[in-house]
Image (spheres, rainbow, N blue to C red):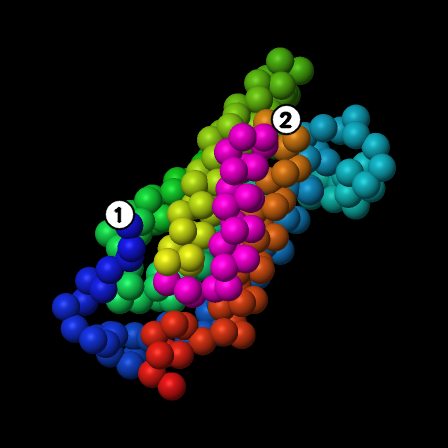
Amino acid sequence: MGLRDRSGGGGDLAPPGLKTPRAAGVAGLLFAALFTASILITRSVAYPTTTGFYADVARLVGDNVSIVSAYLVPFAGIAFLWFIGVVRDRIGVYEDRFFSTVFLGSGVVFVALLFSAAAVLAALQLLTRPTDATTELARLIGRAMFYMYGARSAGVFTIVTSTIALHTAATPKWVAFVGFAVGLVLLLTVQSFDMVILLFPAWVALLSVLMLVKAPPREAARD
């Protein structure tokens, strides 16, 4: 099923003042950086018995883990919403209602679950006398929210975005195929190896870089 021109005309009818600046593509890079930092810090705190790199992160963060829920996660979510807007602007008049609905819905669900999991972590940090049972329950709830459901929403988002990119030629084909692979991995294996989730921000960063350096297909057609 191809992506059809829904505009009824031949061009982009958005007023010049409402155009998304190409520099907004950095939102994806910002999301990738903040999201990756959030995952590394959260894992180092949620699993205090880990050694090596995560133990070093835990010592570096110390008692300031609240910075994850207060700053890193919220701004990562905001940056991701900006990234969604940039991708939709990239698609422009080629947007298809079916794909755009799943694309937008999965992205919003991902952010909502990301915020919810961070809220569980924040609540755990605010407890004055947490018991071992309470701490373990909070960790399990946060993990289920994010890895069981949030990561799968990210997988759907990646697959749908890759489908749109493939049909609109918004990116090279190999980027779309990489996205399909990342999406399938997120859908099928994230619970087996939770750090696989870091493939998602890596792919978002790759897509953002390409959007920054490559003109949208509708602009290239005009040149």
Among numbered discs 2 and 1, the one appearing first in the sequence = 1
Q: Amino acid at mark 2?
A: Ser
Nearer-the-camera pick, 161 or 35: 161
Residue at position x 24%, y 52% in the image: 97
Does the segment drawn in magenta span residue 169?
yes
Q: Amino acid at mark 1?
A: Phe
Does the segment drawn in magenta span residue 32?
no
Nearer-the-camera pick, 57 or 185: 185
x, y percent for residue 22: 45, 74
x, y percent for residue 85: 38, 60
Q: Is residue 123 left or right of residue 53?
A: left
Q: Residue furthest bottom?
A: 223
**Is residue 205 visible to us here?**
yes
Residue at position x 72%, y 28% in the image: 47
In the image, which residues are magenta? 168-190
SS of the residue under disc 2: loop
In the rendered structure, find residue 98 and report the number of the disc placed on it. Answer: 1
Residue at position x 43%, y 41% in the image: 156
SS of the residue under disc 1: helix
x, y percent for residue 87: 40, 61
**Is residue 38 visible to us here?**
no
Question: For the residues marked 2 and 1, what is the alpha-carbon distance in whole angstroms?
Answer: 31 Å
Q: Is residue 209 left or right of residue 49?
A: left
Q: Label the magenta part by its dominant secondary structure.
A: helix
Residue with the mark numbered 2: 192
